[in-house]
């Protein structure tokens, strides 16, 4: 089976409209971290690294993991690998734009990844396809991105409920949102989602963020449990009409106050 290779130009015939007929993005885009009743492949915590992505190779690996996590595919579809590559390249370019500070409305964005050495992943009997697609090299060592999220310093995210804290002046630099939270399905139930969220809090604190938010679908119980365990509390929910208009499950907005930085 062909694997997702690093970015390169797509054939012209693979347009957005064509690709949209062959896949459907999962509705729970805010968080895809835990599915009950899956076999658990145990990750050695001492081998886990949680860090902001500093290279394009690592961003590409994270983009591939997001495509694996957030999209459902029809295995029999002709040209499936080309369409998966198209989605990964689109996410990769968007990530570079956000992290590079080129996206209007965002003061700062960081892609935070959880990764482990390829040698450990290979010993867990997970798919070779996953290892190949989500692999990157850092300081001469092959590693695999097993979880990823974005930390967004901004007033609001497009098409999402806006947080109300902090009020007044300061919201543009003291408020942040988590987005694109996902963990490799092969490695659910290893505490990777909790570890990623904990790391994001530390980065947010370094940025001077006082109020951290995350959106989650109302029917995504595993994600809600993760965030509640991480200290988030309910603040608001999306109007039903907005969810219908955007053709997605209704969201709720959860809030976490960064200790020592409340305004």
Image (tube, helix red, strand yellow):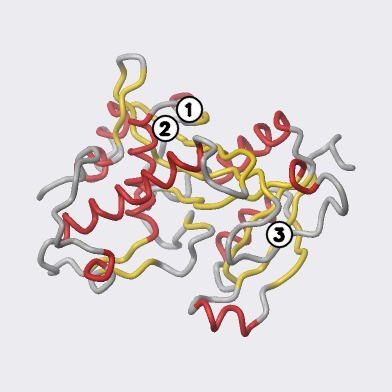
Which residue matches tag 1?
49
- Residue 25 located left or right of residue 250: left
Residue 5 lies in what quarter of the image? top left
Which residue matches tag 2?
115
Q: Nearer the viewer, residue 73 or 21?
A: 21
- Residue 152 located left or right of residue 132: right
Residue 174 lies in what quarter of the image? top right
Residue 68 location, x and y as percent?
Answer: 32, 54
Q: Nearer the viewer, residue 20 or 24?
A: 20
Q: Identify the element where label 1 is drawn.
A: strand
Give yes or no for contact between labels 2 and 1 (Cβ–Cβ under 8 Å).
yes
Q: Identify the element where label 3 is drawn.
A: strand
Give yes or no for contact between labels 3 and 1 (Cβ–Cβ under 8 Å).
no
Which residue matches tag 3?
254
- N-terminal of the pair, mark 2 or mark 1, is 1
- N-terminal of the pair, mark 3 or mark 1, is 1
Q: How far apart are the alpha carbons under marks 2 and 1?
A: 5 Å
Q: Residues within 10 Å of mark 3 (few under 14, many from 20)?
A: many
Q: How far apart are the alpha carbons under marks 3 and 1?
A: 26 Å
Q: How far apart are the alpha carbons under marks 3 and 2?
A: 26 Å
Residue 172 location, x and y as percent?
Answer: 74, 46
Residue 255 location, x and y as percent?
Answer: 74, 55
User: Nearer the viewer's eye, disc 3 or disc 2?
Assistant: 3
User: Nearer the viewer's eye, disc 3 or disc 1?
Assistant: 3
- N-terminal of the pair, mark 3 or mark 2, is 2
Quadrant of image for the C terminus: top right
């Amino acid at each position: 089976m062909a694997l997702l290779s690093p970015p390169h130009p797509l054939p012209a015939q693979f347009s957005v409209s064509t690709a949209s007929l062959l896949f459907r993005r999962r509705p729970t885009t805010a968080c895809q971290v835990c599915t009950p009743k899956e076999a658990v492949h145990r990750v050695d915590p001492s081998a886990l690294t949680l860090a902001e992505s500093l290279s394009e190779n690592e961003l590409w690996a994270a983009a591939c993991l997001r495509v694996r996590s957030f999209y459902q595919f029809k295995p029999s579809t002709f040209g499936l690998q080309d369409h998966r590559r198209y989605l990964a390249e689109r996410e990769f370019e968007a990530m570079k734009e956000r992290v590079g500070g080129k996206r209007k409305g965002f003061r700062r964005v960081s892609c935070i990844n959880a990764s482990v050495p390829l040698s450990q992943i290979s010993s867990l009997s997970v798919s070779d396809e996953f290892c190949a697609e989500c692999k990157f090299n850092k300081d001469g060592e092959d590693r695999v991105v097993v979880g990823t999220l974005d930390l967004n310093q901004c007033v609001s995210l497009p098409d999402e409920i806006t947080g109300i804290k902090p009020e007044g002046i300061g919201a543009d630099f003291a408020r942040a949102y988590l987005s694109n939270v996902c963990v490799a399905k092969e490695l659910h139930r290893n505490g990777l989602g909790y570890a990623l969220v904990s790391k994001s809090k530390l980065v947010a604190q370094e940025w001077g963020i006082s109020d951290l938010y995350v959106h989650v679908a109302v029917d995504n119980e595993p994600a809600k449990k993760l965030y509640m365990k991480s200290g988030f509390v309910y603040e608001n929910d999306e109007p039903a009409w907005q969810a219908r208009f955007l053709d997605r499950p209704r969201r709720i907005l959860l809030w976490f106050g960064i200790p020592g930085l409340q305004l």
